[in-house]
Image (cartoon, helix red, strand yellow):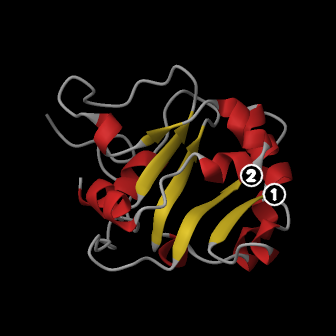
C-alpha cells in the first residue's frame, strides 16, 4: 500500500529532521499550534494553563496562537529538540503531529480521550508515548508532574 502523506508519514518538509535520543534535548516539553473557535477545548485550556509559563520554566514551550501570529514564534525544528511533545486533540480524532513527533524522537504526550493510535495491535504505545486525559490541559503544573523526569526512562522511551 502506498504511504499517505500526513497519515502514515510526516508532511513534506517536516520529515527532514531526525532526533537523536542519545543526546539530551534542549526542551522538556513543547507544543506550538494555532486555535480558533472550532477547535476542541483542549487547545484553549492548554493556552490558558501555559500562558507565561516559560518565565517559570524556560525548558517548557507551549504556545497556541492565532494563525497570523505563528511567524513570531520558534520554528518546528527548534521545538522538535524536546523530551516530550504534546499531541492535543484538534478538529478530529487524528493528528499528523504524531508522525512529526515520532520522527524527531520526542515522546508524544497524547491528550485526546478515547483516541486510538495507528498500528495499536502491533505497537506497544505504552512504552513509547504518554497518555493523559484532556482534563490535565487545564493545569500546567499538574500536567508536567505526570511526565517522567528520570533521564534513563526518557531516553528509553525516546529510543522506541
Q: What residue did someone put label 2 on?
A: 140
Horizontal and vertical percent position of residue 146: 58, 45
Left or right of 69 on screen, residue 30: left
Q: Residue 4: x and y, percent?
A: 29, 42
Whether residue 1 appears in this view of the structure is yes
Label disc, if present, on residue 78 of the rendered structure? none
Which quadrant would residue 106 be assigned to in this image? bottom left
Foreground disc of the pair 1, 2: 2
Q: Secondary structure at mark 1?
A: loop
The percent coordinates of residue 150 (x first, y second) are: 42, 62
Q: Determine the CA span between mark 1 and mark 2.
A: 20 Å
Tags 1 and 2 touching, CB below 8 Å: no
Quarter where residue 55 is shown: bottom right
Q: Quadrant of the N terminus?
A: top left
Q: Mark 1 — residue?
A: 66
Does residue 41 lie above or below 108 as drawn? above
How packed is label 1: few (under 14 Cα within 10 Å), some, or many (20 or more)?
Answer: few
Residue at 71 percent across and 75 percent down: it is 73
Mark 1 or 2 closer to N-term?
1
Element under disc 2: helix
Q: Residue at x 46, y 74 (%)?
A: 81
- Of residue 147 and residue 99, the one placed in the foreground of this image is 147
Amino acid at each position: 500500500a502506498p504511504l499517505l502523506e500526513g497519515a502514515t508519514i510526516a508532511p513534506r518538509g517536516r520529515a527532514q529532521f531526525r532526533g537523536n535520543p542519545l543526546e539530551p534535548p534542549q526542551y522538556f516539553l513543547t507544543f506550538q499550534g494555532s486555535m480558533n473557535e472550532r477547535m476542541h477545548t483542549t487547545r484553549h485550556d492548554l493556552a490558558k494553563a501555559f500562558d507565561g509559563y516559560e518565565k517559570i520554566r524556560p525548558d517548557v514551550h507551549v504556545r497556541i496562537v492565532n494563525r497570523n501570529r505563528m511567524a513570531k514564534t520558534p520554528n518546528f525544528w527548534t521545538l522538535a529538540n524536546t523530551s516530550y511533545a504534546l499531541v492535543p486533540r484538534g478538529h478530529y480524532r487524528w493528528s499528523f503531529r504524531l508522525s512529526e513527533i515520532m520522527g524527531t524522537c520526542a515522546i508524544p504526550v497524547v491528550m485526546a480521550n478515547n483516541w486510538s493510535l495507528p498500528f495499536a495491535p502491533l505497537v506497544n504505545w505504552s512504552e513509547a508515548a504518554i497518555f493523559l486525559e484532556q482534563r490535565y490541559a487545564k493545569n500546567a503544573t499538574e500536567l508536567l508532574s505526570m511526565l517522567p523526569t528520570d533521564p534513563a526512562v526518557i531516553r528509553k522511551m525516546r529510543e522506541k
